[in-house]
Amino acid sequence: PKMTPNISDIAVIAKACEDSGADAIAATNSIQALVGIDVETGRPLLPAFGGYSGPCVHPIMLRIVAQIAQAVKIPISGIGGVSNWKQAIEMMMVGASTVQIGTGIMWRGYKLIGDIISGMESFMVRKDYKSSKELVGISLKHITTTEEMAELPPVVAILDEDLCIGCGNCAKVCGYNAIEMKENDIAKINIDNCDGCGLCVQVCPNSALSLVDKTELIKKRNNFAK
């Protein structure tokens, strides 16, 4: 059976499972949710709380698998929102030794399995991984706390103009007035205003934006000005 994610501290429960003799952990079942309300009648679309799944829950499940992997030594089967090969790799990198897929197959059929396997194989060849076991848990050492993140060097967004398609998404979402669109439909970043929140990076459809060390960038800019 799958573990439920609807608890306060999943690592504690996972450790209790291990201590009680569990051979492995399936992490996890769907997230409890209410699908919606018919505002015309005031009645719920479905009359009970049910399971919420699909790509939208994938970041939550990555967090859960990582927390369990930090707490136990038994194998973990990662479940939740996997719909492409990259998401399967992500699951393994945060500690899952196997990956399960449900909603993705419901949406795209069993062909998805072959697509994911093919994508993973290509990735492993490109990155020179010899076995999928080499992927398991390699990201855990890079996961820290939000408190420790506050002590990290500040970052700012930079733009690769060759990749910018001029969509303007970054300028629309920036709450710090750090991005504007130039006349040639290329984004321009004011690093003095940039807070390094990373929202622009997330909404860019062509991976034209990235985050870099702010101190180093300012140092380079000042040296160039001289």
Image (cartoon, rainbow, N blue to C red):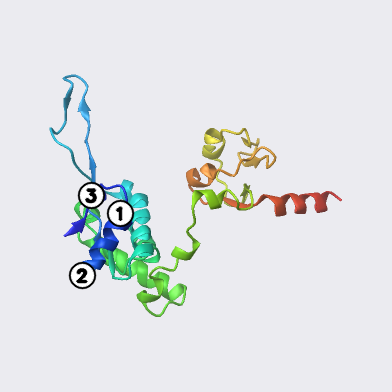
Residue, disc 3: 30
Q: Nearer the viewer, mark 2 or mark 3?
A: 2
Residue, disc 1: 10
Q: Amino acid at mark 1?
A: Ile
Residue, disc 2: 21
- Asked if residue 216 lies left or right of residue 172, the reply is right
Q: Amino acid at mark 2?
A: Gly
Q: Identify the mark nearer the N-term, 3 or 1.
A: 1
Residue at 21% x, 66% y is 20
Residue 105: x, y in percent?
21, 56
Q: Identify the mark nearer the N-term, 1 or 2.
A: 1
Residue occupying the far left of the picture: 47
- The residues tagged by marks 2 and 3 sit, at their Cα atoms, a distance apart of 24 Å
Q: Tell how many labels.
A: 3
Residue 115 placement: quadrant: bottom left
Residue at 22% x, 52% y is 4
Residue occupying the far right of the picture: 226
- The residues tagged by marks 3 and 1 sit, at their Cα atoms, a distance apart of 14 Å
- The residues tagged by marks 1 and 2 sit, at their Cα atoms, a distance apart of 17 Å
